[in-house]
Image: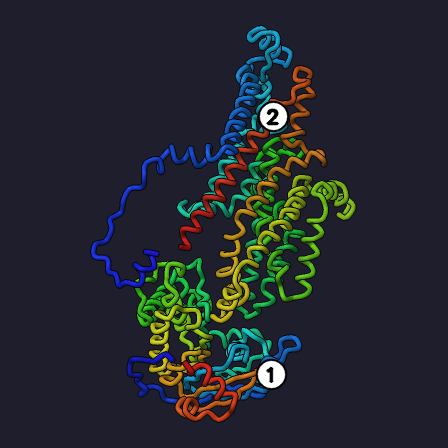
C-alpha cells in the first residue's frame, strides 16, 4: 500500500451543504449489458470522493457520465444545477465547469504545453490570449513545471504530462474535478508527484471525484470512499471505517486482495 | 561457468572505461561498400548485373540523346543532318520540334501577344501559395492569396474586371448576413442563410451588378475563350483549381462519413462510393455532354469550369478516404479530451483533430494531388487540348513534323515530372517540419 509521506493539511477541506452533483436512479447499458445499475449519489461542494472497485465494475463509466463522455439511459444527473440531457448547450456548459484528468493524459501532441493549457480558455471562455497565458503559467507553476511551457508533450515524462493535464483542466477554473485512474499508467517513481499535486488541490477545497487504486491517497485525503462492483454502489463510508471495518463480504474480499501484500 | 562465479561474488567497478574508437574497416566508405554492394555472393552478383544493365541502357540511349539536332525545320531535315554527321546507321533525337513548337506545348492556342498573362498568373500563383505553404513567408502575401482566384481568372480569361469583383461581393454579402444573424443569436440559422443568400446573389444579382458596374466604369482586358486554352496552361489551370477546391471538400466529406447524423453520413458514403466507383472519363463525358440536358436551354456553362468541377469531385472522394484514415488513426482520447474541455464539434475538429489527422494523411493527400494533376491529360476525351496528346497530335498534324513521337512525349513528361517531383519534395519537407515541431 502506498503511503502518503507528508502531513496533509485538512483545514481548508470543508464540506459545505451545497450540492455539487446529484445522481438519481441512474442506469446505463452498453447494448444489452447493464453497466451501471440504479446509481444514487449526492456530492456536496468540497467533498473528496474516492471510487474504488475491481476492473469492470463501472467506476470509470460512472465518472465519465458526469461530464457526458458517456450517455446514461435513465435517471437524472444534475451537475451544478444543470441537468445533463441531450441538449448540447447544457452539455458544453457542464463540461466547461467540470475538469477531467484521464489515465493516458490525452494531451494534444501537436501543441506546446502552454498552448495545451490556453486552448480551451481562449476558444471556450473567450479569454484574451495574454490573460490565458498568464493563467496557464500560474497553474503550470502550481504543478511545478513552468519551465516546460514551451516544450511539446512528447518531450515530457509521464508524471510531468499528467501534471500538465491537471494544469490544463485547472485553467478552465472548474468547480469540480474528475480523475479517471490518473496514476495507473505511470511508473512508480512518478506516482508520488501526481498524487502530491492532487493533495494540494484537495487542500484548497476542490470538489474531487477520483477513480483510483491508491488507497494511501484515499486514507489521507478522501472524506468518503465508494466501493463499486458489478455496476452498483456496494458500500460507501468514511475512509477510516471503510478500511478498518468493511461491512459487505464483497468489500472485504476486495480489500483483502489489494491490501494483502 | 566463470561467469556464474563472477555474479555470485560481490563486485564493485573502481574505474569507469573510457569510450574507444571502433576497429578499422568498420567505418567509412569501405564499410558502406561491403554492407550495401558486396555482402555475400548473391548481393555481389546482383551488383554486377545492375551495373551491366545501367551500362547497356547508357550505350543504347545516350547516343540518341547526344546526337540530338536542335536546328532544323522538319523531321526529314533532322534525319539528314544526323546521317551526314554521325553516319548512315546513327540514330538521334530531333529536338528541333521542341525548339520550334514549345510555345504551343506550354500555351496551346492562347494568342501569342497575350502570353504574358498566363505567365504572370503563374508567377502570382507561387506568390499567393507562399504564405500557405511556408511559415517563413511574409504574412502580407495572404491578401494576395485571398484575391488570387479572381485575379487569376481575370488574367487567364480576361473580360470585364467587374465580373470577379461582382463574384467576390457574394462572399462579402454572405459574411454580412452571417455576422448579423450570429449577433442576433441565430447560431444554427446563420451559416445556412448566409450560404443561401450568397448562392441566390450569384444566381440572380451578380449578373446585373456586373452590368451596372461595367456601364458606369467600363474596364477590362481582352477576352480569351476557353477553346483557345491548351497545353500546360490548360493542365495547370485545371490542376490548381481542382487541388485547391478538392482539399476542403474532401475534409468535409471525411467528417461527414464519420458523422453521427444518419443523413449526412449516408449522403457522404453514397457520394464517395459513387464517385470512386466510376472512371474519371465517365465523369468528364457527363460534364461535357449530359450537363447540357439538365441545365436550362441557352445557358453557356464554360467547358473548363465543368471539367474543373468534375475533377474536383473525383479527387475529393479520394481525399476524403485518405483523411478518414488519418481520423481513424487518432486515439479516442484526443476526441474525449477535446470534449471534456467543452470545445464544440467544429472547434474540436479545427483545433485538435484535423491538424493531427491531416499531418498523418499528408503522403496520401499529395499522392492524390499528383494523380489528379496527371489525370488532367484526360480532358482530351472531351475535346480539350491537353499537352500530352492534344497538342502533340496538333504538332504532328503539320506535314514537317509528321511521324515524330518520342521527343514531344519526353518533353511533356519532363515538365510533368518537374511539377510532380516538386509536390513530392514539398510533402517530405512538410512531414519533416511537422515531425520536428511536435517533438
Q: Secondary structure at mark 2?
A: helix
2 or 1: mark nearer the eye: 1
Name the residue tied to disc 1: A27
Q: Secondary structure at mark 1?
A: strand
Q: Which mark is residue B104?
A: 2
Q: Is residue B347 above or below residue B280?
A: below
Q: Estimate the x, y position of residue B151 in percent, counting from the top left.
A: 54, 41
Q: Residues within 10 Å of mark 1 (few under 14, many from 20)?
A: many
The chain containing the residue under callout 2 comes to B
Q: How many marks?
A: 2
Q: Estimate the x, y position of residue A66 in percent, counting from the top left.
A: 52, 79
Q: Estimate the x, y position of residue B403 in percent, counting from the top left.
A: 68, 18
The foreground one among B15 and A210 is B15
Say which quadrant the C terminus of chain A sits in: bottom left
Horizontally, residue B127 falls left or right of residue B176, namely left
Q: Is residue A252 above or below residue B165?
A: below
Residue B182, quarter of picture: bottom right
x 55%, y 33%: residue = B417
Residue A216, quarter of picture: bottom left
Amino acid at each position: 500500500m502506498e503511503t502518503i509521506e507528508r502531513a496533509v493539511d485538512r483545514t481548508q477541506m470543508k464540506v459545505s451543504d451545497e450540492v455539487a452533483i446529484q445522481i438519481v436512479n441512474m442506469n446505463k447499458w452498453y447494448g444489452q449489458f447493464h453497466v451501471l445499475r440504479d446509481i444514487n449519489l449526492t456530492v456536496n461542494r468540497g467533498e473528496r470522493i474516492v471510487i474504488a472497485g475491481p476492473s469492470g465494475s463501472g467506476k470509470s463509466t460512472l465518472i465519465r457520465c458526469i461530464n457526458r463522455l458517456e450517455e446514461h439511459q435513465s435517471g437524472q444527473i444534475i451537475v451544478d444545477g444543470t441537468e445533463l440531457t441531450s441538449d448540447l448547450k447544457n452539455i458544453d456548459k457542464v463540461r466547461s465547469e467540470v475538469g477531467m484528468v484521464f489515465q493516458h493524459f490525452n494531451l494534444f501532441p501537436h501543441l506546446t504545453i502552454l498552448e495545451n493549457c490556453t486552448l480551451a480558455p481562449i476558444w471556450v471562455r473567450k479569454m484574451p490570449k495574454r490573460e490565458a497565458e498568464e493563467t496557464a503559467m500560474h497553474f503550470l507553476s502550481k504543478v511545478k513545471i513552468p519551465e516546460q511551457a514551451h516544450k511539446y508533450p512528447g518531450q515530457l515524462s509521464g508524471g510531468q504530462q499528467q501534471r500538465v493535464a491537471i494544469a490544463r483542466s485547472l485553467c478552465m477554473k472548474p468547480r469540480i474535478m474528475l480523475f479517471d485512474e490518473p496514476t495507473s499508467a505511470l511508473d512508480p517513481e512518478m506516482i508520488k508527484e501526481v498524487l502530491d499535486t492532487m493533495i494540494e488541490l484537495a487542500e484548497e477545497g476542490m470538489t474531487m471525484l477520483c477513480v483510483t487504486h491508491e488507497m494511501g491517497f484515499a486514507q489521507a485525503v478522501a472524506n468518503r470512499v465508494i466501493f463499486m462492483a458489478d455496476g452498483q454502489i456496494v458500500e460507501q463510508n468514511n475512509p477510516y471505517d471503510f478500511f478498518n471495518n468493511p461491512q459487505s463480504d464483497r468489500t472485504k474480499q476486495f480489500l483483502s486482495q489489494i491490501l494483502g501484500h | 561457468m566463470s561467469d556464474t562465479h563472477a555474479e555470485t561474488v560481490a563486485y564493485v567497478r573502481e574505474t569507469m572505461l573510457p569510450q574507444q574508437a571502433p576497429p578499422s574497416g568498420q567505418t567509412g566508405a569501405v564499410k558502406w561498400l561491403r554492407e550495401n554492394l558486396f555482402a555475400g555472393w548473391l548481393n555481389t552478383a546482383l551488383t554486377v548485373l545492375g551495373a551491366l544493365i545501367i551500362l547497356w541502357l547508357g550505350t543504347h540511349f545516350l547516343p540518341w540523346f547526344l546526337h540530338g539536332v536542335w536546328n532544323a525545320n522538319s523531321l526529314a531535315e533532322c534525319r539528314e543532318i544526323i546521317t551526314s554527321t554521325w553516319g548512315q546507321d546513327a540514330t538521334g533525337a530531333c529536338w528541333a520540334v521542341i525548339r520550334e513548337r514549345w510555345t504551343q506545348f506550354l500555351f496551346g492556342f492562347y494568342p501569342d501577344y497575350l502570353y504574358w498573362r498566363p505567365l504572370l498568373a503563374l508567377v502570382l500563383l507561387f506568390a499567393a501559395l507562399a504564405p500557405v505553404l511556408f511559415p517563413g513567408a511574409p504574412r502580407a502575401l495572404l491578401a494576395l492569396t485571398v484575391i488570387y482566384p479572381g485575379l487569376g481568372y481575370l488574367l487567364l480569361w480576361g473580360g470585364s474586371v467587374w465580373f470577379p469583383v461582382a463574384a467576390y461581393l457574394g462572399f462579402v454579402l454572405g459574411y454580412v448576413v452571417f455576422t448579423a444573424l450570429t449577433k442576433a443569436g441565430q447560431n444554427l440559422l446563420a451559416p445556412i442563410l448566409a450560404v443561401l443568400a450568397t448562392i441566390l446573389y450569384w444566381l440572380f444579382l451578380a449578373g446585373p451588378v456586373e452590368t451596372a458596374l461595367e456601364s458606369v466604369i467600363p474596364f477590362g482586358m481582352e477576352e480569351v475563350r476557353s477553346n483557345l486554352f491548351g497545353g500546360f496552361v490548360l493542365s495547370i489551370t485545371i490542376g490548381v483549381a481542382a487541388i485547391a477546391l478538392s482539399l476542403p471538400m474532401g475534409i468535409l466529406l471525411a467528417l461527414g462519413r464519420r458523422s453521427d447524423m444518419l443523413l449526412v453520413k449516408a449522403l457522404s458514403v453514397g457520394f464517395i462510393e459513387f464517385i470512386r466507383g466510376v472512371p474519371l472519363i465517365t465523369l468528364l463525358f457527363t460534364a461535357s455532354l449530359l450537363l447540357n440536358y439538365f441545365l436550362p436551354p441557352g445557358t453557356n456553362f464554360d467547358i473548363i469550369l465543368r471539367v474543373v468541377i468534375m475533377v474536383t469531385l473525383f479527387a475529393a472522394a479520394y481525399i476524403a478516404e485518405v483523411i478518414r484514415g488519418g481520423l481513424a488513426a487518432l486515439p479516442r482520447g484526443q476526441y474525449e479530451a477535446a470534449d471534456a474541455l467543452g470545445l464544440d464539434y467544429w472547434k474540436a475538429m479545427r483545433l485538435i483533430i484535423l491538424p493531427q489527422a491531416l499531418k498523418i494523411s499528408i503522403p496520401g493527400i499529395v499522392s492524390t494531388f499528383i494523380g489528379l494533376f496527371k489525370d488532367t491529360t484526360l480532358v482530351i476525351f472531351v475535346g480539350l487540348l491537353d499537352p500530352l496528346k492534344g497538342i502533340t497530335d496538333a504538332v504532328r498534324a503539320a506535314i514537317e513534323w509528321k511521324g515524330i513521337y518520342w521527343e514531344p512525349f519526353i518533353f511533356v513528361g519532363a515538365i510533368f515530372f518537374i511539377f510532380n517531383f516538386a509536390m513530392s519534395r514539398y510533402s517530405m519537407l512538410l512531414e519533416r517540419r511537422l515531425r520536428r515541431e511536435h517533438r
